[in-house]
Image (tube, rainbow, N blue to C red):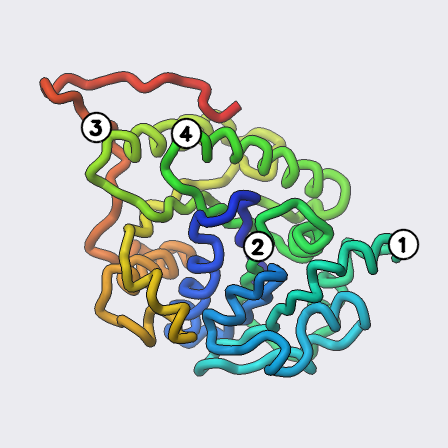
Amino acid sequence: MRRIAVLNQKGGVGKTTSTVNLAAALAAEGHRTLVLDLDPQAHATLHLGLLPGRSGPSLYDVLTQGMPLEEVRREVAPNLYICGSHIDLAGAELELINMVGRETILRDQLEADTESFEYVLMDCPPSLSILTLNALCAAKEVLIPLQAHFLALHGLSKLLETINLVAKRVNRELRVAGVLLCLYDAGTRLGGEVIEDLDRFFDGRRGAPMPWSDAQVYRTRIRRNIRLAECPSFGQSIFQYAPSSRGAEDYASLAAELQGREPASLWIGSGARAHGSDGAREDAPTARIA
């Protein structure tokens, strides 16, 4: 079982979109896949066609009442399951504050689960809370969706510090699988410069005793695509809503890359640095990830 936390402390970077549509792509290939919606906003739950509070118990009941995952889990498509969220999760931090072992509740529940899944994808809230800590303790891998701009690079350094702290103290198996560029525009010089910064940062830490020493910048880039923005309002993944769209192509490509295959997409974002208007190579500033 691969347990992957999809995490970025900044909202609006494609975290939920990537969790849901990567899960749908894996399920479409025949892999039993489970989505855990740990965000109190319940966007992944809505994205997969369930109404929070009207579809039975949620992960709130798992974390605060000890309810087994099997009583919360719902099948939403062939091979695709979700344990939904609820706004009550926002209060879980206070309810769990005095509980011993509160950070490992989700991990314990996954290990006790009688069902077998090949992939578990966790949609984390855009904050470093007890919910996020539960995901990091339960996961073995972290996938970081990121937009190609420089403020995002500075936020990445803080996120990596948190992951490193969890790996040292609570979950020694935790590692960063990679960074996924979302809302990507290949027509801008900025995108290429950000990719070069990321490549330089991770390549400079190969073999280091850090959870991101083997991390990659995925070759697949998730392009801006209006269909990806539309499909949540229909409670469908991109593969149900617009299976021929660029969004479906990109997430199918990511699923292939995650499994070690060549990306399925015919379009793979270039990491080459853009050139100036005169055709000359322009050097980007360094040390943006600090």
Mark 2 touches mark 4? (CB < 8 Å): no
Q: Earlier in the sequence, mark 1 or mark 2?
A: 2
Residue that appears at 58% across and 38% down: 159
Report the residue marked by disc 1.
98
How many C-alpha atoms fall within 10 Å of the one at disc 1: few (<14), some, or many (≥20)?
few
* Residue 1 can be seen, yes or no: no
Taking the image as shown, residue 11 lies to the left or right of residue 186, namely right
Q: Earlier in the sequence, mark 1 or mark 3?
A: 1
Distance CA(mark 1)–CA(mark 2): 25 Å
Residue that appears at 70% across and 37% down: 165
Mark 2: which amino acid?
A: Ala
As helix, strand or loop, the secondary structure at mark 1 comes to loop
Taking the image as shown, residue 57 lies to the left or right of residue 47, namely right
Report the residue marked by disc 4.
150
Q: On screen, 45 above or below 186?
A: below
- Give how far across and how far down residue 48 sits, in percent: 47, 73
As helix, strand or loop, the secondary structure at mark 2 comes to strand
Give the image quarter of residue 128. top right
Mark 1: which amino acid?
A: Asn
Report the residue marked by disc 2.
5
Mark 1 touches mark 2? (CB < 8 Å): no
Report the residue marked by disc 3.
274
- Give how far across and how far down residue 198 sits, in percent: 41, 32
Q: Nearer the viewer, residue 134 or 175?
A: 134
